[in-house]
Image: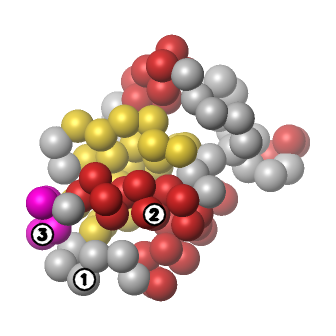
Amino acid sequence: MKILNSTQRKKLRGMAHGFKPLVFIGQKGLTSQLIQATDDALLDHELIKIKFIDCKEEKKEIIAELAAKVSGQLAGMVGNVAVMFREHPEEKKRKVVI
């Protein structure tokens, strides 16, 4: 997967503006269930919102580790909401074109 440039990240953030968060990160932080849920959501949707509920201090470290574990890319983070993107492995099933 190629690295997103700033124009692509901006476009993805705009596309995700009306989305509701699909993954919520709470007190427990990064768990195997959270990683699996994020991986499944990225496979189904390619572009998702992730909301932080209780772990607001260490959110940058958590989102960076989560992105590395699911091979996703962070498109942006505003407040307690992050936008993550990962292309579908099959070209025919890709929904998001950047």
Question: Mark 3 or mark 1: which comes first in sequence?
Answer: 1
Inter-mark Cα distance, 3 to 1: 9 Å
Categorize mark 3 by other alpha carbons within 10 Å: few (<14), some (14-19), many (20+).
some
Magenta-colored stretch includes residue 43: no
Residue that label 2 marks? 66
Residue that label 1 marks? 28
Q: Residue at x 33, y 46 (%)?
A: 82
Above or below residue 40? Residue 76 is: above
Q: Quadrant of residue 75?
A: top left
Inter-mark Cα distance, 1 to 2: 14 Å
Q: Which residues are magenta?
A: 53-57
Could you tell me which secondary element the residue under label 2 belongs to? helix
Name the residue type under label 2. Answer: Leu
Q: Does the residue at mark 2 contact the one at mark 3 (Cβ under 8 Å)?
A: no
Above or below residue 55? Residue 36 is: below
Residue that label 3 marks? 54
Which colour assignment does the render follow?
secondary structure
- Where does the N terminus fall, quadrant-wise? top right
